[in-house]
Amino acid sequence: MERKRIGDDARMVHVAYAMTDKHGTYSKYIGASICSLFERTDAWVTIHLLHDDTLTEKNRANFIELARRYGQQLFFYNVAEECKELLAEAREIFRRAVDTDYYTPAALYRLLAPIVLPHDVKRLIYLDADTIVNMDIRKFWEVFLDGNPLGAVTERTLMEHYQKQIDRSIDEKLYLFKNSWTDFDTCFNSGVLLMDLEKMRDMGEILLPGLRFIVQHEEECRFFDQDILNYFFARDFLHLPWIYNILQPWDRDWGSSEPVEGIYHYMGRTLRYNYEEPRDRIFYEAFVKTPWCDAEFLCKSYVVTRNILAGELEKYVERNRKAAAVWARRKRVFVGPQADEKKLREMFMLAQEDPYIALDDGWSKGLNLPYELGTHVYVFFLNKFPELKKQLNAAGWQEWEDYIDGKSIIIPHPSNLLDDYRIFLVM
């Protein structure tokens, strides 16, 4: 059956993404997100890609190929051209929100969707590039907005799901709680939105007045597009369930062992190169089905991985050389939790007579280190080592002479080295 165009069928699901891709390496994230969406639905979907002149012909071709593979629609909108005068005025009001390394114009494009998209598109799902749709998008599309201009997930909703205590002293620094238009109960994350474009169009253009507001409250604003949306809608939006914006870092720490049905939001640089982690795996399962995962990408990934591993391993080898030089002059005294003694003795082949000082969680209240510094070196395996280091330095101890951070000389598993560098992000 031939698909109808744009918004002329109520069954059509409309989804928008926004992008600036200065180095041509960002498009693949949106590609993976789109692929995850297509894979899990039999609904008709139209993708609206809000972009600028940084979209390369190769990436454009990849997006088109991806949509064709799944028999879906995709439309491109060069927002930099279509809203040229508006963005020029935005730069005059507050350039930092538009043209910095951290804040690119793409962050503001979601605010311009009601203007840029055809008026027969009356309803829209907006997704950040760093999302993976682990559900049938039609379920989200069919959420009843009950007269609200948009729907979003609040941080409070997520906190309550994970049963975490709310630290208002921290959150008040991040959001606009000092003012009357929003508070912890109403502030929402703008990475996943369900938008009633008709109601938003009735409000008129919000970008420029939003930026004027930001200028007046710059010290209180950190996420400019989100702050503007909260300014206009914090008291007038549908509070969505947590599953529609699952913050991946939180879910990694506090969530279930396996992914749940919902939309995962990777919050920038939280995606890792670890297929054993289920939240990473659902991303790569989508990515490998996109046109971006080709022979060139695989070869480049191998080279980058090899070079990073070689460089990092050399650092650990050098630290072990330094430790060995100290041990040649002084006797080792290992210090760590009682539960780790057996493991550390085996790892470092300690004789039974070699000293091991077991410290419990209350070690910071007072250290009992009985061995002479001139003849012994302390090797610490403690989680609070940075705090301990300050105490030792203040007492005149010398690192790599009197004490060593034992964890710094244990070579981690290669997959953990890759986690630290998030290799996928540099490609």
Image (tube, rainbow, N blue to C red):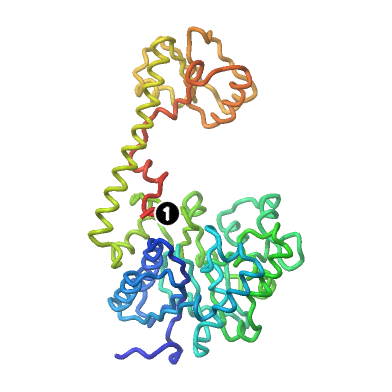
Q: Label 1: how many residues lie within 10 Å, few (<14), some (14-19) or many (20+)?
A: many
Q: Nearer the viewer, residue 13 or 201?
A: 201
Specify whether 85 is left or right of 210: left
Quarter that holds the C terminus? bottom left
Q: Position of residue 129 (x, y in %)?
A: 45, 66
- Compared with residue 320, is residue 5 higher up or lower down, i.e. above or below? below
Quarter that holds the N terminus? bottom left
Q: Nearer the viewer, residue 180 or 304?
A: 304
Q: Residue 346 lies in what quarter of the image?
A: top left
Say which residue appears at 63% left-offset and 60% top-offset: 156
Q: Residue 345 lies in what quarter of the image?
A: top left
Amino acid at dot 1: Leu
Disc 1: which residue: 271
Say which residue appears at 67% left-offset and 66% top-offset: 186
* Disc 1 secondary structure class: loop
Q: Position of residue 128 (x, y in %)?
A: 48, 67
Say which residue appears at 57% left-offset and 17% top-offset: 397
Specify whether 276 is left or right of 234: left
- Compared with residue 4, is residue 302 higher up or lower down, i.e. above or below? above
Tally of marks: 1
Q: Position of residue 19 (x, y in %)?
A: 46, 68
Q: Position of residue 64 (x, y in %)?
A: 32, 76
- Compared with residue 264, is residue 308 higher up or lower down, i.e. above or below? above
Say which residue appears at 42% left-offset and 85% top-offset: 12
